[in-house]
């Protein structure tokens, strides 16, 4: 909230992000289908896709149909927000997708 990530995304994206946080497993993964996600959020599918696109641009989630992953928040840019070191661990699906895309070039 301090970095205002969600404020830049709009209410539909905030709803989707909260939903994904709620249903995600320990790695941030969610397998809910677009139709059921849209229905649970009271959105039509075009609005759901627009919300997803905003979260992707904000780098808050990764998406490879049908899989969503909630990503670790980017480091704080506000000097008043303490930095927490990130432990080495599993790579996010976004990193894997980027690596695959780079290898195909």
Image (cartoon, rainbow, N blue to C red):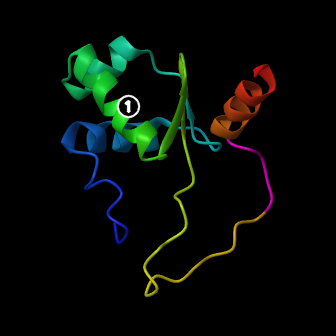
Q: Is residue 61 above or below residue 104?
A: below
Residue at 24%, 28% in the rendered image = 41
Left or right relative to 35: residue 98: right
Residue 15 visible, this orientation: yes
State which quarter of the image contains the N terminus. bottom left
**Which residue appears farthest toward the front when viewing the image?**
105
**Which residue appears farthest toward the top when viewing the image?**
35
Give the residue pinned by disc 1. Answer: 53
Left or right relative to 52: residue 86: right
Q: Position of residue 14 (x, y in %)?
A: 28, 45
Q: Is residue 2 above or below residue 51?
A: below
The secondary element bearing badge 1 is classed as helix
Q: How many marks?
A: 1
Q: Is residue 74 above or below residue 104?
A: below
Q: State which region is magenta.
A: 88-92
Residue at 37%, 68% in the rendered image = 3
Residue at 37%, 31% in the rendered image = 52
Query: Which quadrant holds residue 92?
Result: top right
Query: Which quadrant holds residue 33?
Result: top left
């Amino acid at each position: 909230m301090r970095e205002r990530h969600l404020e830049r995304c709009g209410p539909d994206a905030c709803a989707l992000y909260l939903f994904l946080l709620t249903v995600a497993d320990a790695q941030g993964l969610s397998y809910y289908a677009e139709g059921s996600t849209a229905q649970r959020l009271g959105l039509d599918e075009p609005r759901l896709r627009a919300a997803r696109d905003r979260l992707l641009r904000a780098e808050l989630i990764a998406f490879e149909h049908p899989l969503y992953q909630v990503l670790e928040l980017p480091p704080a840019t506000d000097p008043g927000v303490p930095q927490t070191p990130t432990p080495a661990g599993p790579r996010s699906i976004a990193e894997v997708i980027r690596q695959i895309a780079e290898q195909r070039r």
